[in-house]
Image (tube, rainbow, N blue to C red):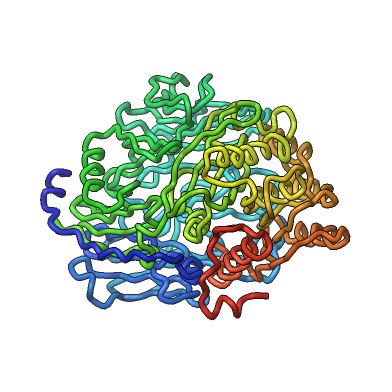
């Protein structure tokens, strides 16, 4: 089938490159993706995509005929709600999820200002039906049951349970919803001890996870297809830091699962696991330098629902290692014909396998989508069509030595030009997350304006093994100590390499990265000329008290050791010795705006140089930073780097008229 499909590829439509010498205007950086979530219908007749038709607008869904992408599409909007995603559920029907801002202030920690709904659209009848359950999740489109979907939602008491138990183990009810009859049938009701359930393509439950509140253990269960009984196959105490994740069934060994686990190693491996014997049957993939990043599922979800075909590795590069030769061959051939190919993903495929949509993304490609239909590969469009690959920046994986000789990984976004460059250290949030080489809007924006950008994978970053992750907190929190040294040591390394100069450096971070920027402002000697702190934790005790008494197990050790033992910026204001730009959203649910307000009062009392920018209506997360928010954020940041920090070599921002109007 793969050879038959690809033998007919005859054309690739490519726009001629437009190379420009100056940076892109900020209004182009502030726009959200012009198109996203491109999917083909099961029979290959329709292509659906989300489109933002104008600057600052909300997405609409457009449905095209795959035989003629130039014809006028059928359009759907959800005013006054904002569409966030959609999925085909049959040849003529799709469901979409939408959200609406329902309050002006957050409703407590991690309780945001949005509520969600889902709706069904009949393309033929051009009819929309809203499914009324509050905040539902679409679990599966049930490829083996056309016209039906699997939805779930948390029933009564969810708020209190959510405060005491992590999201993965909150009890949810699972319902099969008949789209034509608009009726639903209860399949199973979860509970804390068995509350998170996976289903096959026909809606049969086969895997579950739960929590034993008496023993403090996480439990995994399986269920045979012909049985209604759940059988326990794995327990792990909540204090354990060992990874154990079931990604799905093993397509090569009936009855086995494919799991990611440490199983005695520092890094995670991918294993075939026998739930009946409760033993690891075979090691499928493992590296000594990195944990598993993810798995690759079959490109045809209609006929091979969530079938695992490979493993995704991300460290020095993002790469897929295929177990399925046919899938590997298909991806190899697509990679050979896609410009600036880095990581291509088949995002949807027709049931017969002959039509598909493909997304390419990489450091120089913010996201470009293609349609393969009737033997022809066509360009659908780019997510940021106004960016040319040649005017974006390369990203290089590096390692450098910390002062205690620990190797620190990092990603370096290198502007076009000749070094040395002004340097921005951009630590990720979390802090216990992982990054990889891909298109990063903030790093690429800064590089486009002439700045070298270092994204240090400081200790505590995920993906580099258990010891590296735990070193941030296992012997006391290292925030402001070794974790901060790791960032400063990256500056020393880049100066020694001739890529930067010691008097031309700033730090910009968001969330934990904002916390790191505040800590940097109080260090002496200081490696930075100024810092920009977005959504920053300024008061460690206040932050951890939001959830201190709800924490258990390894999460309690991680969070309490991190925040209780690390430096608190609020207590270090008297030591601030560089200018600070403080930025915060006024409805931030994860790091409430009180952090900025408390820190500002102390800055003012101490007479420290600072500027404050508040983003009205912005939450903590990137998908709540809209056009006006980003215009103000980017304009404020770039102006500050030149006017207040004096970073030489950077470019003044190229602005549209609305940028100036958005300033405070």
Compared across the picture, whether 533 is left or right of 206 comes to right
Compared across the picture, whether 471 is left or right of 258 comes to right
Question: Quadrant of residue 111 in the image?
Answer: bottom right
**What residue do we see at 44% from left, 62% from top?**
85
Pick the front one: 83 or 452: 452
* Residue 356: percent from left, percent from top: 25, 55
**What residue do we see at 48% from left, 66% from top?**
29
**What residue do we see at 25% from left, 38% from top?**
328
Question: Quadrant of residue 113 in the image?
Answer: bottom right
Q: Is residue 540 above or below residue 281?
A: below
**What residue do we see at 52% from left, 42% from top?**
498
Pick the front one: 324 or 12: 12
* Residue 396: percent from left, percent from top: 44, 42
Q: Quarter of the image containing the N terminus?
A: top left
Specify whether residue 89 is in view: no
Count of picture labels: 0
Looking at the image, the residue that sits furthest to the right is: 605
Specify whether residue 169 is in view: yes
* Residue 583: percent from left, percent from top: 68, 62
Compared across the picture, whether 301 is left or right of 1 comes to right
* Residue 295: percent from left, percent from top: 39, 38
Q: Quarter of the image containing the C terminus?
A: bottom right
Compared across the picture, whether 311 is left or right of 546 comes to left
Q: Is residue 136 above or below residue 632?
A: above
Pick the front one: 255 or 328: 328
Pick the front one: 368 or 504: 504
Q: Is residue 76 above or below residue 363?
A: below
């Amino acid at each position: 089938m793969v050879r038959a499909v690809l033998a007919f590829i005859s054309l690739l439509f490519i726009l001629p490159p437009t190379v420009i010498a100056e940076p892109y205007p900020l209004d182009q950086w502030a726009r959200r993706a012009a198109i996203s979530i491109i999917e083909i219908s099961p029979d290959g007749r329709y292509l659906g995509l989300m489109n933002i038709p104008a600057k600052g607008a909300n997405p609409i869904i457009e449905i095209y005929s795959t035989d003629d992408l130039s014809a006028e599409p059928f359009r759907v909007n959800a005013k006054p709600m904002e569409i966030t995603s959609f999925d085909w559920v049959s040849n003529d029907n799709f469901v979409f999820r939408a959200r609406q801002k329902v309050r002006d202030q957050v409703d407590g920690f991690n309780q945001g200002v949005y509520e969600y709904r889902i709706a069904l659209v009949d393309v033929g009848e051009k009819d929309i039906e809203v499914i009324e359950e509050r905040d539902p999740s679409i679990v599966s489109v049930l490829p083996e049951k056309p016209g039906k979907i699997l939805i779930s939602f948390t029933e009564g008491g969810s708020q209190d349970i959510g405060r005491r138990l992590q999201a993965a183990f909150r009890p949810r009810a699972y319902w099969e919803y008949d789209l034509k009859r608009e009726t639903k049938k209860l399949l199973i009701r979860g509970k804390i001890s068995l509350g998170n359930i996976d289903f096959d393509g026909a809606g049969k439950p086969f895997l579950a996870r739960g929590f034993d509140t008496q023993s403090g253990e996480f439990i995994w269960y399986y269920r045979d297809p012909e049985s209604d009984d759940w059988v326990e196959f794995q327990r792990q105490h909540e204090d354990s830091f060992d990874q154990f994740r079931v990604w799905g069934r093993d397509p090569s060994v009936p009855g086995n699962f494919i799991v990611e686990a440490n199983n005695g190693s520092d890094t995670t491996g991918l294993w075939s696991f026998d739930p009946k014997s409760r033993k690891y049957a075979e090691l499928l993939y493992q590296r000594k330098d990195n944990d598993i990043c993810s798995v690759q599922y079959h490109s045809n979800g209609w006929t091979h629902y969530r079938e695992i075909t490979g493993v995704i590795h991300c460290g020095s590069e993002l790469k897929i290692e295929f177990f399925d030769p046919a899938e590997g061959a298909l991806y190899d051939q697509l990679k050979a014909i896609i410009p600036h190919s880095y990581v291509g993903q088949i995002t949807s495929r027709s049931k017969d396998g002959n039509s598909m949509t493909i997304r390419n993304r990489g450091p120089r490609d913010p996201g470009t989508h293609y349609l393969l239909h009737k033997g022809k590969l066509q360009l659908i469009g780019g997510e940021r069509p106004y960016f040319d690959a040649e005017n974006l920046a390369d990203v290089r994986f590096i390692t450098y030595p910390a002062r205690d000789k620990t190797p620190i990984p990092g990603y370096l976004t290198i502007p076009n030009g000749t070094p040395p460059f002004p340097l921005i250290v951009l630590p990720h949030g979390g802090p216990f997350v992982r990054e990889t080489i891909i298109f990063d809007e903030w790093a690429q924006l800064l590089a486009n304006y002439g700045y070298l950008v270092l994204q240090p994978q400081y200790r505590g970053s995920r993906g580099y093994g258990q010891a590296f992750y735990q070193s941030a907190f296992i012997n006391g929190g290292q925030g402001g100590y070794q974790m901060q040294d790791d960032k400063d040591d990256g500056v020393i390394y880049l100066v020694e390499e001739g890529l930067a100069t010691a008097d031309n450096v700033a730090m910009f971070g968001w969330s934990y990265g904002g916390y790191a920027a505040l800590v940097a402002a109080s260090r002496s000697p200081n490696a930075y000329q100024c810092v920009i702190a977005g959504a920053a934790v300024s008061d460690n005790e206040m932050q951890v008290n939001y959830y201190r008494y709800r924490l258990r197990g390894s999460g309690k050790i991680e969070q309490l050791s991190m925040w209780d033992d690390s430096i608190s910026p609020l207590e270090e204001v008297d030591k601030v010795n560089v200018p600070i730009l403080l930025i915060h959203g006024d409805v931030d649910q994860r790091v409430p705006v009180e952090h900025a307000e408390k820190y500002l009062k102390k800055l003012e009392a101490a007479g420290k140089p600072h500027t404050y920018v508040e983003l009205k209506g912005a939450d903590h997360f990137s998908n709540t930073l809209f056009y006006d928010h980003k215009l103000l954020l980017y304009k404020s940041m770039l102006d500050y780097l030149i006017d207040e920090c004096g970073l030489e070599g950077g470019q003044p921002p190229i602005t549209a008229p609305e940028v100036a109007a958005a300033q405070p």
